[in-house]
Amino acid sequence: MTTSPSLCFAIAVVTASLGAVSAGAQSRGVVPPPRPQPAPAPAPPANADRIRPTQSPLPDDYTLQPGDKLRVEVYKDAQLSQSVQIRPDGKITLPLVGDIPAMGMTPIALRDRVAAALKDYVNNPVVTVIVVEGTAPTAYIVGEVNRPGPVTLQGNMTVLQALAVAGGLKDFADAKNIRILRKAAAGAQTTIPFNYKDAIKGSGSTSVLLQPGDTVIVPD
């Protein structure tokens, strides 16, 4: 059977039309969007093994001492709000009011003192005192001991215990006339006598407790 040229042309047209319809259908097909990939977990910092935990909360009766870092906030007054550190003389310096004794006070007591000092300059000042970083309570042993220097106070440490930490007295120490120099909150200094020989016998000034900043002098 012979196919006529007109029939061949018709078949070619139909085939081309079907191909165009198929291609159009694919181009109009709805392609589902790719599924979102979960974000990768953040990598730990390079020094993660050296990050130290935050400082433990301080007790309510914590007494301030030289070296403590404080944040003094005055409500709605950014210029008066300051980050300060208690100096060796036991004081801090604030705008308007100048030097204020802080050593030996609790943060609440210092807050009240700062608020009272600001009343001459600010109407009803609202003050907050935060201990940002507290220092380890330390006393100092000088003179005729085997290891003079600072001693970290562990709980209620007596003078006798501190002298033991300092290695004990040297052979020519004047054990009867040891003195403890203690600074009061107002900056005044008091002297407390201590008799080592009475203390080791369980009498006399055995119960004398050291305070942060005390200096124990052991003469020869």
Image (tube, rainbow, N blue to C red):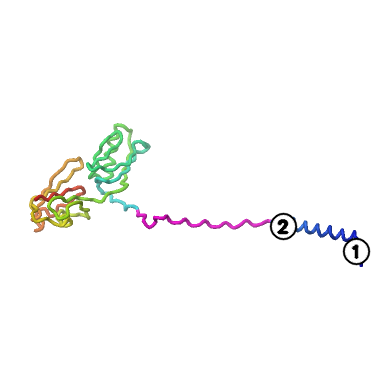
Depth check, front residue: 195 or 43: 43
Q: Where is residue 32, by image quadrant? A: bottom right
* Element assignment for label 2: helix
Quadrant housing the N terminus = bottom right
Please state which amino acid type lies under the numbered disc 1: Thr
* Element assignment for label 1: loop
Please state which amino acid type lies under the numbered disc 2: Gln
What is the distance, in whole Å, between disc 2 and disc 1 at their CAs? 33 Å
Disc tally is 2
Depth check, front residue: 41 or 130: 41
Judge whether residue 213 is colored magenta.
Answer: no
Mark 2–mark 1 CB contact (< 8 Å): no
What percent of the width, then of the height, locates residue 135? Answer: 27, 49
Does 85 sit left or right of 18 as displayed?
A: left
Does 113 sit left or right of 29 as displayed?
A: left
Q: Which residue is mark 1?
A: 3
* Residue plotted at (29% across, 32% down): 120
Depth check, front residue: 33 or 58: 33
* Residue plotted at (20% across, 53% down): 151
Q: Which residue is mark 2?
A: 26
What percent of the width, then of the height, locates residue 183? Answer: 18, 44
Q: Where is residue 29, by image quadrant? A: bottom right
Q: Which residues are magenta?
A: 30-53
Judge whether residue 45 is colored magenta.
Answer: yes
